[in-house]
Image (spheres, grey):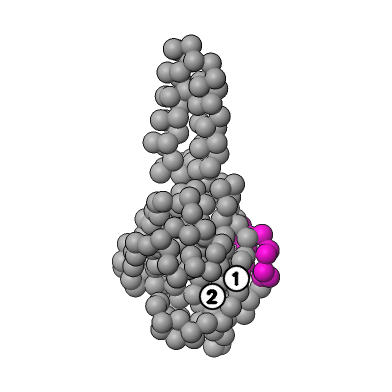
């Protein structure tokens, strides 16, 4: 029998249960306004941690969007932190109303995971990419192409969840983590990657094709 996917990220259950318990307790104590507020919070938190299924494009050269949100940056840069060379950087900003479950953009193997504590500037600010707390996964595809996907904390986000571990083999579109309450994801790709999206475009994790790798074929 096929296992059914529960459309709520497991990291959300403690928050949902706490809000629901608080709302119930306030209702039992006759605190109507507090109970109603607790009910609204329970609804919002449940909705925030939603984890819908997505139809992942079946194309090994496609770079699949790792996060729901809006493209805020497409720029070729000199990257001395992750790929150590010329790279194409694509940044996706997630506001509190977006799905916050993150997915792998390309199939491959996790070469390294780097977690760096930092500041909490607004995630759509240029300072965020340089100074905010982040978790970076350096990846290698089966054809040897290296890329990096970076979860960046935001102004409200105070917790990055990364389920991947060094040495893991992952597939494009696979869920690997989330960031709580507003943040961004940065992709560092080879500079010859062909971009398929535009600035300010709304994108969907696991579905939107951001770019195509140059496999050299």
> Quick one: label 1 or label 2, which is nearer the N terminus?
1
Residue shown at 62% from the left, 80% from the top: 194
Which residue is nearer to you in this view: 187 or 131?
131
In the image, the segment drawn in magenta is: 197-210
Res. 40 visible in picture: yes
Residue shown at 42% from the left, 30% from the top: 17
> Which residue has dot 2 on it?
89
Where is the C terminus found, in terms of image quarters?
bottom right
x, y (%) of residue 15? 42, 36
Q: Main secondary structure of the magenta part?
A: loop
Q: Are marks 1 and 2 in contact (CB under 8 Å)?
A: yes
x, y (%) of residue 103? 49, 59
Secondary structure at badge 1 equals strand
> Which residue has dot 1 on it?
73
Secondary structure at badge 2 equals strand
x, y (%) of residue 125? 55, 64
Please tell me how many numbered marks the rendered image carries.
2
Which residue is nearer to you in this view: 62 or 204?
204
In the rendered image, which quarter is residue 204 located in?
bottom right
Badge 2 crowding class, 10 Å Cα cut-off, few under 14, some 14 to 19, many 20 or more, is: many
**Is 71 above or below relative to 16?**
below
Q: Is residue 83 magenta?
A: no
x, y (%) of residue 2? 48, 44
Q: Is residue 24 left or right of residue 61?
A: left
Residue furthest out toward the bottom: 216
Q: Is residue 139 left or right of residue 38?
A: left
> Label 1 vs label 2: CA separation?
7 Å
Res. 171 visible in picture: no
**Is 97 above or below relative to 191?**
above
């Amino acid at each position: 029998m096929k296992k059914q996917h529960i459309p709520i990220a497991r990291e959300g259950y403690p928050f949902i249960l706490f809000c629901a318990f608080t709302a119930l307790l306030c209702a039992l104590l006759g605190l109507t306004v507090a109970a109603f507020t607790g009910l609204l919070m329970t609804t919002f938190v449940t909705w925030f941690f939603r984890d819908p299924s997505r139809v992942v494009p079946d194309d090994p050269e496609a770079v699949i969007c790792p996060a729901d949100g809006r493209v805020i940056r497409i720029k070729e840069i000199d990257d001395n932190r992750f790929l150590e060379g010329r790279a194409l950087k694509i940044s996706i900003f997630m506001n509190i109303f977006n799905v916050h479950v993150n997915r792998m953009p390309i199939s491959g193997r996790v070469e390294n995971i780097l977690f760096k504590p930092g500041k909490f500037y607004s995630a759509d600010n240029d300072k965020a990419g340089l100074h905010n707390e982040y978790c970076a996964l350096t990846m290698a595809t089966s054809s040897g192409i290296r890329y990096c996907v970076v979860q960046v904390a935001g102004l409200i986000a105070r917790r990055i969840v990364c389920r991947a571990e060094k040495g893991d083999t992952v597939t494009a579109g696979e869920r690997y983590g989330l960031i709580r309450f507003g943040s961004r994801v940065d992709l560092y790709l080879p500079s010859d990657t062909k971009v398929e999206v535009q600035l300010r475009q709304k994108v969907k994790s696991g579905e939107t094709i951001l770019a195509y790798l140059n496999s050299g074929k």
